[in-house]
Amino acid sequence: MNCTEAEASIPRYADGELGALERRPIERHLRGCAQCAARHADILALRERLRSEAPYFAAPPGLRERIRAVLESAPANAPDRPRASADRWRLLGGGAFAGCAATVLAFVVGTSVLDWRENRDLAVEAVTAHVRATLDRQQIDVASSDTHTVKPWLSARLDYSPPVLDLAVDGFPLIGGRLDTLDKRPVAALVYRYRNHTIDVFVRPESSGAPPLRTLRGFNVAHAQGAGWDWLAVSDVSSDVLTAFVERLAREAPAP
């Protein structure tokens, strides 16, 4: 099995979808190919990060007890009434309780969603874009280390011409770029390689009042502004390396 043949099987192997006969050749290949083994490890690590980062909305701790209290407070022996009347009241009572429960549930879920959306910032959007591009294998629209190839390609598709730098001499080679979206607007995403790590750098014209950024579990986010540009970098490299890298980009980039 060569790397081309292994490329299609690695995701299925990571997900445990291969049978015993299919696993043996891919396992032999992974033992002898460092590049494919690293890709397999990246898929496993990314899956764990997605599990830890996916939002989960739990009901308030007291909701179960409140519903149970309502049920237990209902009269055990209702007075006799004609069957039609009893059925009517049973339906109305059940509907009212179901409506209350649905209202409470809708309120809890809706409030949680709104709180989560209000707390979203560019760091969350950038990490989401980085993960989405990795999973879809669409990290690069224009694959090139030539800045004179990447820059015109992006400029032709945006309403601004982003600066494109290659820092290969410092261990950060440019491997391409793509179009992405941040804050509901198209943005240039430059893709760099650092050792076995991929770095996405989102570049857009500098805006006043950049929102506060935070480090998300499993991914580091670094932000810098300079020369009229706003730089947002996402990767799993160490925070000090990522911060120094994005600050250098901001410092050396030409003004718009």
Image: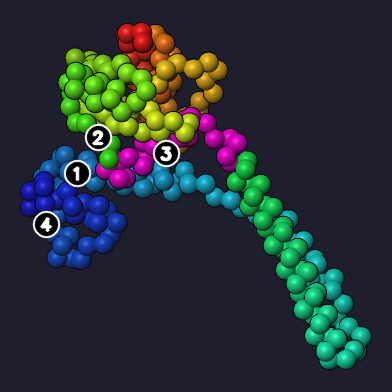
> How much space separates mark 2 and mark 4, taking CA atoms?
31 Å
Q: How crowded is mark 3: few (under 14 residues within 10 Å), some or many (20 or more)?
A: some
Q: Is residue 64 visible?
A: no
Mark toward the start of the polypeptide (3 vs 4):
4
Q: Which colour scheme is used?
A: rainbow
Q: Mark number for residue 141?
A: 2
Q: Mark number for residue 128?
A: 3
Q: Nearer the viewer, residue 119 or 12?
A: 119
> How much space separates mark 4 and mark 1, taking CA atoms?
13 Å
Mark toward the start of the polypeptide (4 vs 1):
4
Mark toward the start of the polypeptide (2 vs 4):
4
Residue drawn at x 19%, y 14% is 169
Of tags 2 and 3, the one toward the viewer is 2
- What amino acid type is highlighted by mark number 3? Thr
Of tags 2 and 1, the one toward the viewer is 2
Mark toward the start of the polypeptide (3 vs 1):
1
The residue beneath circle 4 is: 25
Residue 79 versus residue 122 in the image, above or below: below
> How much space separates mark 3 and mark 4, taking CA atoms?
34 Å
Find out whether the residues at labels 4 and 1 contact each other: C-beta distance under 8 Å: no
